[in-house]
Amino acid sequence: MVKSTQTAELLGKMQDKDRQSLARLISLVERESPDVPEIMRQIQPRLGHAHCVGVTGPPGAGKSTLVDRMTAVLRQQKFSVGIIAVDPTSPFSGGAVLGDRIRMQQHYLDEGVFIRSMATRGSHGGLPRTVRGVIKLLDAFGKDFILVETVGVGQTELDIMEASDTVVVALVPEAGDTVQTMKAGLMEIADIFVVNKADREGANYLVAELMAMLRMYPKQSYWEVPVLATQATNNVGIDELCQKVAGHRQTLQETGQLTQRRQAQRKREFFQTVEQKVTSRLIQLIETDGQLTSYLERVEKGQIDPYSASIEIIKNKELLVNWLQGIEREG
Amino acid sequence: MVKSTQTAELLGKMQDKDRQSLARLISLVERESPDVPEIMRQIQPRLGHAHCVGVTGPPGAGKSTLVDRMTAVLRQQKFSVGIIAVDPTSPFSGGAVLGDRIRMQQHYLDEGVFIRSMATRGSHGGLPRTVRGVIKLLDAFGKDFILVETVGVGQTELDIMEASDTVVVALVPEAGDTVQTMKAGLMEIADIFVVNKADREGANYLVAELMAMLRMYPKQSYWEVPVLATQATNNVGIDELCQKVAGHRQTLQETGQLTQRRQAQRKREFFQTVEQKVTSRLIQLIETDGQLTSYLERVEKGQIDPYSASIEIIKNKELLVNWLQGIEREG
C-alpha cells in the first residue's frame, strides 16, 4: 500500500541496482514524504549487511580527505561504498575549493561509490532521523561500507554517530583545547581516534594525551580504542585505519556486540518515531483546537506557567482523545 | 500544595533574598525534583524583570573572562548579576587553572553576584530545560542581569541561547574555520558579535569578514548586529560591549520585540514540557506493559521496522488510554 505507484516503481528499480532510483528515494526520505513509513517497511528485510562508519571531529580536521582516502582503499579491496556528508565544509557536500572537487572526481565517476550530501542548515532535530533513513537506503541498495561524515560533536552529531557501527573521531595537533572541552563526549563515542595532519607540531603530544586518557577511562573490555597518526593528504596511515575499522567490525561480530548495538539503535529509533508522531500531532492541534489555543495564549502572556498548563492539558481527557484520534487518522 | 513543606520554606526564604535557599532551589531544579512544577507555578508572578544575556562561542574564545569583566562593569552600575556557567572549561564551573580562580574571587565574595555552574556531562536533551529553570529562579530572586555562558554552537547551546534576551557570540581571530562552518548557526543566533583577543593577528580580518556577512544577510530591520573588537584580559572594549547589550535591551523593549521573544520562549517551553511528560511516561510503560514490551522486542530483533511498529502502537487504543491515564496519575 505504497501511496504513490511511483514510489513502488522506485523501490523495484532500486532493487535492480538503479542508482537514479536510489537517489530519488533518498530525496523522498530527506523531504520526509508520506511514503517514508512504507519505504522503510519494504526495505526492512534487506537491511543489516552494510557496516556503517561514522567520521566526526572539529572543522579543519581533514575528515573529508580521510573519507576520500578510505574510500580508495575500500574500493581496491572490491568493497562498494556509500558516502553521506553532513559536513557543510566537506568537498562531498559542495562546500569545498576547486582543488578538493577535482580530487574527488575519481569517486564521482566510480559506479561502486554513491555519494550524497545532506544539508545541515535550519535543521532542528530532524537531521539525525533523515540521516538514519538514508543509511538504511544505502544498506538496502547493497553497499558494503557506508561512511558518514559529520562536523562537530554536538547533540545532533552524537545522534547521527549513534546510528554508526564504528565511530572514528578525527582530530588535529592544534585541537588540544577542543579535546579538553569535549573530553567526555569524545570518549563516549570514539571507537578509533585519528590524529590527522600528523606531520604538524604537537601530533606526538596529542597522541600520547589521548592514549593516557584512554588508559584512565577504558571504554569496553572487548575493544581497546586505538589512536592512529595519519596524514590523509599524503596517504599516510590510511591502510592502517581501514585495518582497524575491519578489526573493529570483526570484534563486534565475534563478541555479539554488533547485534546489541543494532538492537539499541532500533530501540532508539522506535522511541523517537513514536515521540515524533505524538508531538507533531499535538503541535498541529494546538493551532486548530480552540481550547488548546487558549491555553497557549495564556502561556504566551505569562498568565500561567508552562508546567501548570501542560499538566492541565494532560488532565483534559476530551482533548487527549481528540489528540490521539488525530494521530490514528494520520497513521 | 508543594509536596514538601521544606520546599515551601525555601521559596519563602528566597523571597527574602536568602542566597542559601536560592542555591538549594536551584539544586532541586537541576535534579528535576517532583516539586519543580510547583516551584515554577509559585515564582511565575515574579518573573520578567531580569535581562538574560547568553554568551557563547568555541572553546578558548575567552567567554568566561568576558563574563567576568562584564560583571564588573554591571556591578559598577549597581546592577545585581546572576551567572550560569554551562561551559566545562569555565573558571566559574571549576574547570580552570588557579589564576582564573583567583581572578574570579572578587565576584564570589560580592553579595550582588550569584554564580552557578552546571554540568554538561552525560546530559541528553535535559540540560536546556534545567538551565531555563535556573534562569527563572535567578529572575524571581530579583537579579537585574543574568549572564549564561555556554561553549560551542551545537543544538544544546542553541536551545539554551533561545532562552536569552540578548545573545553574544564570542570568537577569536583564529576562528576563521569555525566561522565558515558554523556560519548559518552563528548568524541565526547572534545579536552581538565579539572578536576577543583582538590584539592577535587576523582580528581586523575577522571583524571585516563578519561585517560583510552581516551586510549580506541582515537579520532584522529593528537591530543592526554590531561586531566589537575586545581584549577581555586587558579590559579593552568591555564598556562598549555592555553599552551594546543595554542598547539591544532598550531596542527590544521599544519595538515590542522583547514581548514577542518572551512569548516565543514560553511557547517553546510549553510544547517541550508536554512532549517530555508524554514521552517519559511512554518509555516507562514500554518497560512494564507486556504488549509494548513485545513490540519492542520485535523492533530490536529487526522483525518489524520502527516506523510500522510505532504506527501499530498508536492505533492501539487500549494501549494509548493506559499510557495517558498514567500521565494523568503522575500529573
Image (cartoon, coloured by chain):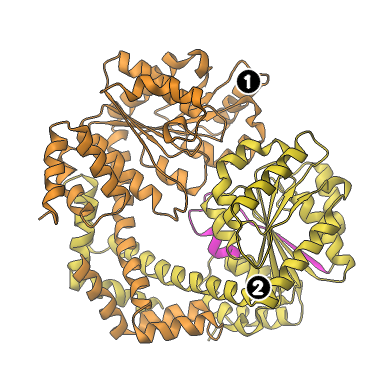
Chain colours: A orange, B yellow
Can see residue A244?
A: no
The residue beneath circle 2 is: B137
- x and y percent of residue A303 in the render? 55, 86
Which quarter of the rendering shows the N terminus of chain A?
bottom left
Q: CA distance from mark 2 to mark 1?
A: 45 Å
Which mark is in front, 2 or 1? Answer: 1
- x and y percent of residue B87 in the render? 66, 50
**What residue range appears in magenta?**
B112-131
| Residue at x 75% of width, y 49% of height | B91
| Residue at x 21% of width, y 34% of height | A141
- x and y percent of residue A169 in the render? 49, 31
Is B184 or B44 nearer to us in this picture? B184
Is A129 or B255 nearer to us in this picture? B255
Compared across the picture, whether A169 is left or right of B234 comes to left
Q: Residues within 10 Å of mark 2 (few under 14, many from 20)?
A: many
Q: Is residue B126 magenta?
A: yes
Compared across the picture, whether B310 is left or right of A120 comes to left
Query: Which numbered circle lies on residue A203?
Result: 1
| Residue at x 60% of width, y 57% of height | B189
- x and y percent of residue A319 in the render? 31, 82
Does dot 2 land on a helix, a strand or a loop?
helix
Which amino acid, by three-letter code, is at mark 2?
Leu
Residue A252: which quarter of the image?
Answer: top left
Is A207 or A292 nearer to us in this picture? A292
